Image: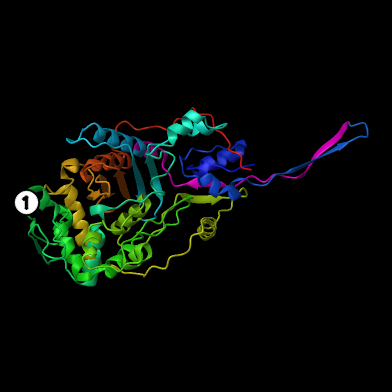
């Protein structure tokens, strides 16, 4: 007797038990069914058959009843999941066709939606994806070759790959600078376009328009994504302080989400460079780290945790895709037991990051800058969110790669006044961060019931039960 996987209500769970059948809701490429096999598979029963000397069955009876496996209730919202997948695919196709003005060749991306207060993952999408039906009974050579491409459709890009964050990292730099006291919320820094130290790095606006942003405070620096401001902030505080706050937000560390093959990524720090190259850190390198480049490379689930913590007041959360596990006798497995089980199965050690209490005033200054990104005319995503009915805090990011391509990010949370969800969309070689903001907007519309064409779950599909051996 096997358990079920899916996001169902308590009432539906009771109905299924009364009817005596189980159904597994398809959850994509998470592999969660293999991780929790010990809970799902239950225990076999025993039937004894008595036979006469002639070989005739004289009696059959059960000597030990089978025990049904536990039911795993996921945090995934089925309709939001479908919209997230569609919004991501549509966004990539629009970028590919030049629908945002300039065409970028891309066929890869990912997206994730998280409850900012609990860390529950409400949807997660990876593009391109695959049809799980192709694996039933053994996959053909043709399909196997189709899936083994450079776009890695068999990989869950929300947890199994990491990318340089680019400008979406700047809120970490801002928090670190404010909390360490090297800047304050009222101070302005004059961006002249070219930073006058080390290798004289340029602000992006100088590269594009041969001028600087002028004087900006920390909120304005986030709104306009001013590199110069964060160069100066980083130079004042140094890499150790920056890495300390980045680690507190869960960057460069496995989250411990209940999924196999999660990677930790890398966090720019003295230790990272020493471990990778056996070389010392130079002060000028901190400038690149401060704008999300250098050795910084994070997974989408880490980014979603980081944005959620910004939105929820700086409180640490644990990303999760398992809402609860209910045993066949109706008892519920404790969260502590689930996490212990997951950590042991995945070999995750508890990371003791420093417990940090972040000033609400400092956080408010950061959030104000993120609101300006979408709500003020000078914001880098204003053209996407103007006249939008839901207030959104956001940040664009365009991260350069070693191959010369530019990956596109948009991170956001909504509603701004009382945040409920964080949304992260990433497109490989997407060109500009604000391109991906359109997908975030569509996802937010679905979550808050603004999507006129509601996508309904297909209830005509015959339920099925997966067996685990």
Q: Report whether 463 appears left or right of 110.
A: right
Q: Is residue 116 visible?
A: no
Instruction: Inspect the magenta stretch and tell me whether residue 205 lies in it.
Output: no
Q: Kindly identify the residue that appears in the image at 62 percent across and 37 percent down.
A: 20
97 up-or-down from 30: above or below: above
Circle 1 residue = 210
Locate residue 146: give its quadrant.
top left
Q: Is residue 8 visible?
A: yes
On the image, the x and y values in percent for residue 161 come to 38, 49
- Most extreme residue toward the right is 53
State the extent of the magenta-drawn residues as a range.
Answer: 56-83
Question: According to the image, what is the colour scheme of the structure?
Answer: rainbow
Locate residue 189: give its quadrant.
bottom left
Q: Residues within 10 Å of mark 1 (few under 14, many from 20)?
A: few
- Most extreme residue toward the front is 278
Q: Kindly identify the residue that appears in the image at 52 percent across and 29 percent down.
A: 140
Foreground residue among 24 and 341: 341
On the image, the x and y values in percent for residue 141 come to 50, 30
460 up-or-down from 404: above or below: above
162 up-or-down from 140: above or below: below
Q: Report whether 331 appears left or right of 354.
A: right
On the image, the x and y values in percent for residue 18 come to 61, 39
On the image, the x and y values in percent for residue 337 come to 54, 59
Q: Helix, strand or loop at disc 1?
A: loop
| Quarter occupied by the N terminus | top right
Foreground residue among 27 and 278: 278
Q: Report whether 270 appears left or right of 56.
A: left
């Amino acid at each position: 007797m096997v358990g079920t996987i899916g996001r169902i209500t308590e009432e539906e769970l009771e109905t299924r038990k009364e009817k005596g059948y189980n159904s597994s809701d398809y959850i994509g490429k998470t592999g969660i069914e293999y991780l929790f096999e010990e809970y799902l598979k239950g225990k076999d029963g025993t039937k004894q058959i008595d036979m006469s000397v002639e070989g005739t069955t004289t009696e059959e009876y059960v000597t030990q009843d089978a025990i049904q496996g536990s039911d795993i209730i996921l945090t995934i919202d089925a309709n939001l999941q479908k919209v997230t997948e569609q919004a991501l695919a549509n966004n990539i196709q629009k970028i590919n066709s030049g629908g945002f003005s300039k065409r970028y060749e891309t066929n890869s991306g990912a997206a994730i939606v998280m409850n900012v207060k609990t860390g529950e993952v409400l949807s997660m999408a990876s593009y391109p994806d695959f049809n799980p039906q192709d694996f039933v009974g053994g996959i053909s050579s043709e399909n196997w070759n189709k899936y083994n491409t450079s776009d890695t459709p068999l990989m869950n890009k929300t947890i199994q790959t990491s990318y340089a964050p680019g400008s979406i990292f700047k809120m970490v730099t801002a928090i670190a600078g404010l909390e360490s006291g090297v800047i304050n919320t009222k101070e302005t820094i004059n961006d002249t376009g070219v930073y006058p130290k080390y290798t004289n790095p340029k602000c992006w606006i100088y590269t594009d328009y041969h001028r600087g942003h002028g004087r900006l405070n920390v909120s304005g620096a986030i709104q306009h994504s001013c590199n110069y401001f964060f160069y100066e902030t980083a130079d004042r505080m140094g890499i150790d302080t920056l890495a300390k706050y980045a680690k507190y937000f869960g960057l460069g560390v496995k989250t411990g989400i209940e999924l196999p093959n999660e990677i930790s990524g890398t966090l720019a720090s003295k230790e990272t460079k020493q471990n990778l190259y056996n070389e010392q850190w130079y002060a000028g390198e901190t400038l690149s780290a401060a704008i999300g480049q250098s050795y910084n490379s994070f997974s989408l689930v880490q980014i979603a945790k980081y944005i959620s913590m910004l939105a929820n007041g700086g409180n640490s959360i644990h990303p999760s895709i398992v809402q609860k596990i209910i045993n066949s006798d109706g008892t519920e497995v404790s969260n502590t037991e689930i996490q212990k089980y997951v950590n042991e199965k995945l070999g995750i050690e508890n990371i003791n990051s420093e417990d940090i209490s972040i000033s609400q005033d400092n956080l408010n200054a950061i959030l104000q800058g993120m609101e300006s990104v979408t709500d003020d005319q000078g914001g880098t995503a204003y053209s996407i969110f103007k006249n939008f009915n839901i207030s959104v805090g956001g940040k664009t990011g365009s991260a350069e790669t070693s191959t010369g391509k530019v990956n596109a990010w948009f991170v956001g949370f909504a509603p701004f006044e009382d945040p409920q969800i964080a949304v992260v969309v990433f497109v490989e070689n997407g060109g500009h961060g604000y391109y991906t903001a359109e997908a975030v907007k569509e996802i937010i519309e679905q979550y808050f019931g603004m999507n006129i064409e509601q996508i309904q779950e297909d209830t005509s599909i015959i339920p099925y039960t997966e067996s685990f051996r």
